[in-house]
């Protein structure tokens, strides 16, 4: 340890404070000569830039995800059309196959009846599923608490 370091260490707090008051640099100034106001302006500017960049990144990611989702939906739509055509040709094949045994008129009626049963079962299952929908219960519950939270009141029905 050098002699000047020992001297600084031995100095009392009031002496160190007095030495700081006599320094060339004001107390509210950084090492590079900028004031606290300038430093805060730099920080807020950098924070603003960072937020703008984050928003731009989020927009780019949403745009990319949207493009991919659109392609995926288009492919599912193509698969649905292909599946529908498969069912049509399968139905025609069943119609003609049954037609050899019971006649084309009756076989068409049998195939149509099978599809009517399938459609009815799917409609009942879809109706049952839609009846299970309860809406946004949790969201509605938390949104109803917001006015109380803002005013500082507690919920009365606990």
Image (cartoon, grey):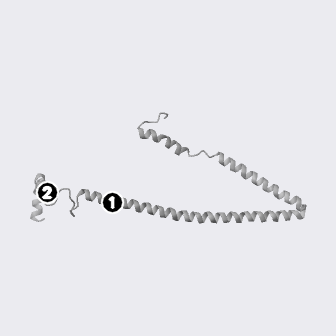
Q: Mark 1 or 2, which is nearer the eye? A: 1
Estimate the x, y position of residue 50 in percent, counting from the top left.
Answer: 38, 61
Task: Give the vertical position of 154 relative to 87 (above or below).
Answer: above
- Residue 20 numbered mark, or none: 2
Q: Nearer the viewer, residue 112 or 9?
A: 112
Crowding near pointer 2: few (<14 within 10 Å), some, many (20+)?
Answer: few
| Residue in the foreground of this view, choosing between 5 and 116 | 116
Rendered image quadrant of residue 87 = bottom right
Residue at 13 percent across and 61 percent down: it is 24
Q: Residue at x 20, y 58 (%)?
A: 29
Q: Name the residue located 63 percent from the left edge and 65 percent from the top edge.
A: 74
* Residue hosting label 1: 45
Q: Residues within 10 Å of mark 1 (few under 14, many from 20)?
A: few
Q: Earlier in the sequence, mark 1 or mark 2?
A: 2
x and y percentages locating residue 92 in the rendered image: 81, 64
Q: Which residue is drawn at 71% across and 66% down?
A: 82
- Residue 84: image quadrant is bottom right
Please say if the residues under marks 1 and 2 sit with CB atoms less than 8 Å apart. no
- In the image, 70: left or right of 34? right
Tag 2, which secondary structure?
A: helix
Q: Which of 122 and 78 is in front in this view?
A: 78
Task: Classify mark 1: helix, strand or loop.
Answer: helix
Q: Quadrant of residue 93?
A: bottom right
| Image position, residue 7 (x, y; %) | 9, 60
């Amino acid at each position: 340890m050098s002699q000047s370091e020992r001297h600084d260490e031995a100095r009392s707090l009031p002496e160190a404070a007095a030495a700081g008051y006599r320094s060339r640099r004001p107390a509210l100034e950084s090492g590079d000569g900028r004031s606290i106001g300038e430093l805060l302006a730099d920080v807020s500017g950098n924070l603003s830039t960072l937020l703008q960049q984050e928003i731009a990144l989020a927009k780019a990611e949403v745009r990319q995800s949207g493009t991919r989702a659109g392609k995926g939906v288009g492919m599912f739509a193509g698969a649905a059309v292909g599946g529908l055509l498969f069912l049509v040709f399968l139905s025609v094949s069943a119609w003609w196959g049954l037609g050899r045994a019971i006649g084309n008129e009756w076989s068409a009626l049998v195939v149509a009846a099978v599809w009517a049963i399938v459609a009815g079962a799917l409609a009942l299952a879809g109706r049952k599923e839609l009846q299970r929908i309860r809406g946004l219960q949790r969201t509605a519950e938390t949104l109803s608490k917001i006015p109380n939270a803002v005013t500082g009141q507690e919920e009365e029905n606990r």
